[in-house]
Amino acid sequence: MVKYRLGYDYVFIPNEPIAYKGEDVSSMSVYVLFQVFDENGQERLFESEELEDQRLSLKNGESCYLTNLVRCSFDKETILSFERNQSVLKDSGYTIEWTIDSYSKDVGIGFAEAQEISKEEWMDMMVQYRELFDNRDNESAQSVAYFTEEVTV
């Protein structure tokens, strides 16, 4: 069995592709790594044979994905905004923390290829083109992929 943390991408889509340094940028993404803690403050790691996406079992018997617990959105002033879903978290038995693991721009139209970039370049592009990112699609950014971080205990 492998123990691991889960992370997800959050994708920000401009109203139109951005021409940036000779490239057509169709979207921008942040990759967010989550840590889940139980009521005793112990980190709850995911466990399975394969590094796979999993739902978190809640105290009320329901389950949800981590992306249901934290909303990531575009904010015209601060660029990125994270908000905990308190209605789900309050009775879940968990608290959740996160860190931004990496940043990317998606180059190409139709078929786009993710290219990892620095936080500075990512923020510069988001600020420079903030009007294009200020749209309904980014009020709650889409998550289309997950990643994992193995943890040795």
Image (cartoon, grey):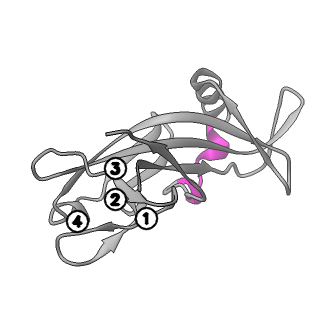
Helix, strand or loop at disc 1?
Answer: loop
Provide the residue designation for mark 3.
Answer: 83
Image marks 1 and 4: residues in contact by CB distance under 8 Å: no
Magenta stretch holds residue 131: yes
Q: Label 3 is placed on what type of residue?
A: Glu
Distance between the Cα atoms at labels 4 and 3?
A: 11 Å
Q: Secondary structure at mark 3?
A: strand
**Residue matched to label 1:** 54
Q: Position of residue 46 (x, y in %)?
A: 36, 56
- Residue 123: quarter of image: top right
Q: Secondary structure at mark 2?
A: loop
Give SS at disc 4: helix
What crowding class fits label 2: few (fewer than 14 Cα within 10 Å), some (14-19), or many (20 or more)? some
Point out the frontmost of discs 1 and 4: 1
Residue 87 numbered mark, or none:
4
Foreground: 105 or 146? 146
Q: Is residue 21 placed above or below 70 in the rendered structure? A: above
In this view, the residue farthest toward the front is 1
Q: Nearer the viewer, mark 3 or mark 2?
A: 2
